[in-house]
Image: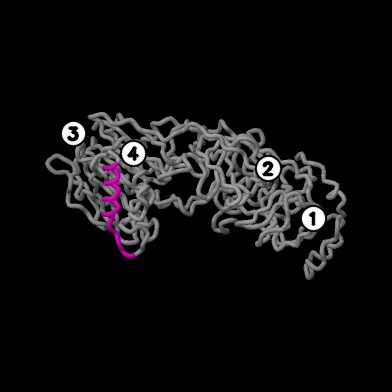
Amino acid sequence: MRSSHPRSAAVAALVASALATGLLAGSADAAEGAASADPVRIHDIQGTTRISPLNGKQVADVEGIVTGVRTYGSRGFWIQDPDADDNDATSEGVFVFTSSAPTVAVGDAVKVSGTVGEYVPGGVNSGNQSVTQISKPAVSVVSSGNALPEAAAINEYTVPAEYTPAGDPAAGGSINGLALDPSRYALDFYESLEGMNVRIGTSRVVGATTPHAELWVTVKGWENTARRGGTVYGSYESQNTGRLKIQQLAPLAQQPFPVANVGDKLTGTTEGPLDFNQFGGYTLVARTLGTVKAGTIAPEKTKPQAAQELAVATYNVENLDPTDPQEKFDALAKAVVENLASPDILALEEIQDDNGAKNDGTVSAEQTLTKFTAAIAAAGGPAYQWRTVNPEDKKDGGQPGGNIRQVFLFNPARVSFTERAPGDAVTATGVVKENGKTHLTHSPGRVDPANPAWDDSRKPLAGEFVFRGKTVFVIANHFGSKGGDEGLTSHHQPPLRSSEAQRLLQAQAVNGFVKQILAQDKNANVLVLGDINDFEFSATTDALADGGALYPAIKSLPKSERYSYVYQGNAQVLDQILTSPAIKKFTYDSVHINAEFAAQNSDHDPQVLRFRP
């Protein structure tokens, strides 16, 4: 049984009333409801599964204490029955959706009549779980200034170690119909508290403050800890049960949301209703918000390459185009010079055309690259040259009109680019061997651009470089995004990851191309790099590495350092560099300069690999 405050005198004095006959006019339940001796309680509405047993039914005079009021977004308020039942699976709180700004206040004892429903944030096709709520409410305030029900503690002792039960095969993998087991599964534990007043104590920040005024903490400080303070997502079974999203009830105009980075602490008590929303699932909407205590992490700087080392890097610069403020160009340029130590070859992803998202048929990125390379030189970096292949208009996905593509920057003082009949958007580069030397038919060129795997997606860019007399083949990639995948808190368990199908085909295409090179020269130096948009343990990465053609170099790092992106409090791998068998010795660095910080120049961390060809 959950501990709870005794009812206030005002609530204790309330007499159970018959269901409102006007509200239930014409309902088949009217006679039964009117005759019932006991009014409907909140735990009756919530039930022991994710779907209310009263879904679609009208209820009357549901009693509770107001624990939170939201005047923006999904407007409404939460109420909680201060007298808990003896079943931990049934929540004692529920959200009352008012559509307009609610007129109740925290501490009011209320009676609510309305329709019970299951609202799915993001829509039913999102895969999200639903929020049990009362809508179209008639609300009467019985008394004010009542003590709130004691907040349920969310901490390392109360949250189970196991994340979720497997979905019911007979229900398409859904867990909606399964009885909640909050002592065994974390998702069931959180669901059993849906709508209730909850609290956390001092907790480590594992997802920096976003522009949407939210951050992520972990209540399990020891769970898959990253070296710099985050929580590593290292497998599909390591969802990290202690992660919890934090927002605030107060409008931002009244109370600015605190700025926090990964590794900071949210100190003191944070308390409020437990909500479920479209972006991240279970969310503590703080009525009382703790204080951020700054941690010690700073943007990393990689080690400069030695004279005989070739440094190759990849960096997703997040839709860079000439309409971006000069400050973004300067910040990205400074990172290339100071944090990445001016790599010899830099593969860029998300370079947009010369007018960005303006959808007018422009495909050249000449102005974008001129502006960026000038900013690098101004920051003290080398006079980089670039090579790319312009895409066909509106054929490569990304922001409409932006025509993003991959680009090679290279330092001509250190490395040369081998020009071989530059390809166009629709021409595939090939592999040939002439006079005992293997080379590409087009450099720069695109890998298998007609393959349906690249429909509405970025085609790989291949180039041939020479460093100290040795040829190095580099293939820059930006695989299909994870858009459309269900979140970890989906009602399907495991969640549906529909985007994987395309990335698997893309990985197979790139792997096949690498094998063509290795078939001609088993000792070829080949690097496949870029925003792979998938984890080092994924089927995508396995397909890239198939047959030993490539090795995911990020696996050379300790598990606590394997990440390039932070999503919903999970530090994870999206950006990768993979090496061919000839590259036996190398140094790898995931350079953490963005993903852990509220102030970002991009949402990805760049990757650098150094080796001696």
The residue that mark 1 highlights is 40
Q: Position of residue 455 (x, y in %)?
A: 36, 57
The answer to whether marks 3 and 4 mark residues whose Cβ atoms lie closer than 8 Å is no
| 2 or 4: tag closer to the N-terminus | 2
**Do residues under tags 4 and 1 come within 8 Å of each other at their CB atoms?**
no
Q: Residue at x 38, y 57 (%)?
A: 397
Residue that badge 3 annotates: 468
Kind of residue at disc 2: Val
Disc 3 element: loop
State which quadrant residue 574 falls in: top left
> Does residue 359 appear left or right of residue 446 in this picture?
right
Dot 4: within a 10 Å radius of its alpha carbon, few (fewer than 14), some, or many (20 or more) residues? many
Numbered disc 1: secondary structure: loop
> In the rendered structure, which disc, 3 or 4, sits on the residue that comes first in sequence?
3
- Marks 1 and 2 in Cβ contact (< 8 Å): no
From mark 4 to mark 1, how far is it between C-alphas? 60 Å
Q: Which mark is residue 198?
A: 2
> Is residue 369 shown in magenta?
yes
- Identified by mark 4, the residue type is Leu
- Determine crowd level at label 2: few under 14, some 14-19, many 20+ residues with C-alpha closer than 10 A: many
| Dot 2 and dot 4 residues touching (CB under 8 Å) | no
CA gap, disc 1 to disc 2? Answer: 23 Å
The mark lying in front, picked from 2 and 4, is 2
Left of 595 or right of it: where is 608? left
- Of marks 4 and 1, which one's residue comes earlier in the chain? 1
Residue 150, compared with residue 307, is above or below; it is below
- N-terminal label among 1 and 2: 1
